[in-house]
Amino acid sequence: MNAPLPPRAPDGHIVYAIGDLHGRSDLLERMLIRIEEDAAVRPAEKRTIVYLGDYVDRGHDARGVIERLIEGPPDGFEQVCLMGNHESWLLDFLDSAHAGAGWFMNGGVATLASYGVPFSHGGNRMDRLKDARAAFAEALPPEHFSFLDGLHYLWRAGDYVFVHAGVRPGVSLGDQDPEDMVWIRDEFLESSADFGAVIVHGHTIRDYPEERPNRIGIDTGAFATGCLTCLCLDGEKRDFIQT
């Protein structure tokens, strides 16, 4: 019996997948320089940068990250931006102040600050959340909202599928629930199932990129560690670029 062929990116198409940024615009700029340097020595017909979500919260410059992504990719590249659970949380907060309690405990206050919105810790809790929601809705530029509201959940290239958190085992890739794609953890991480493609994801922090037969995790906690990870897929080759 012939051994199965190794997974590969499409011929002539190099893919650079970038893990969770969480407000670290400085690391994003540094990584884009590294990617351009790498691409200069890799002949290709097409180059795509895929961002795996979680652009906001925790780090100090969520606004700067969003502005840089809206600017678009470097010359000669295409760009795909995926939805993370923190972007989903932000949008939920804009819909309802009630979502702010959980969001603020997980880095949302840093995002408010990056848009010049203060958050008071005194007075009635619900009133404070409503005031913060109204102020944030006013401060968030329309193009930033459009960007966040238009993020994709899943993208495929060759034998690889890119998603923020993962996918639910036993469910076809075309039928995945958006909630799972931005939030799932243990059911996905502990599964040895064949998902129909190798899943490239962030969401779960590891000290080093995590390669399994069915998935590759590249969230290395950049907001705290300063180590932003990018996976480069070039045919059958896999390389990691880190700040």
Image: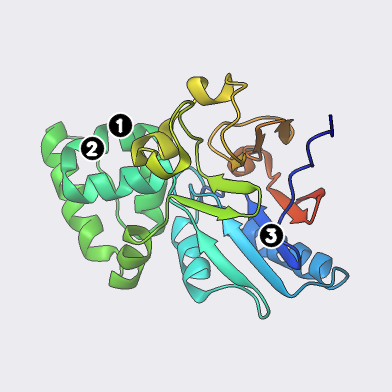
Q: CA distance from mark 2 to mark 3?
A: 35 Å
Of marks 3 and 1, which one's residue comes earlier in the chain?
Answer: 3
213 relative position to 200: left or right = right
The percent position of residue 139, horizontal first and vertical second, equals: 27, 64
Of marks 2 and 3, which one's residue comes earlier in the chain?
Answer: 3
230 relative position to 79: left or right = right
Q: Quadrant of residue 93?
A: top left
Name the residue type under label 3: Val
- Circles 2, 1 touching at the beta carbon (< 8 Å): yes
**Residue 12 or 239: which is nearer the viewer?**
12
- Circles 3, 1 touching at the beta carbon (< 8 Å): no
**Residue underneath mark 3:** 15
Name the residue type under label 1: Gly
**Residue 109 or 30: which is nearer the viewer?**
30
Of tags 3 and 1, the one toward the viewer is 3
Neighbor class of circle 3 (other Cα within 10 Å; few <14, some 14-19, many 20+) is many
Q: Secondary structure at mark 2?
A: helix
Residue located 31% across and 63% down the image: 145
User: Residue 99: which disc?
Assistant: 2
Residue located 16% across and 55% down the image: 134
Residue located 39% across and 50% down the image: 111
The quarter of the picture where the N terminus appears is top right
Q: Secondary structure at mark 3?
A: strand
Name the outermost residue toward the right: 41
Name the residue type under label 2: Ala
The percent position of residue 18, horizontal first and vertical second, equals: 63, 52
Q: Secondary structure at mark 1?
A: helix
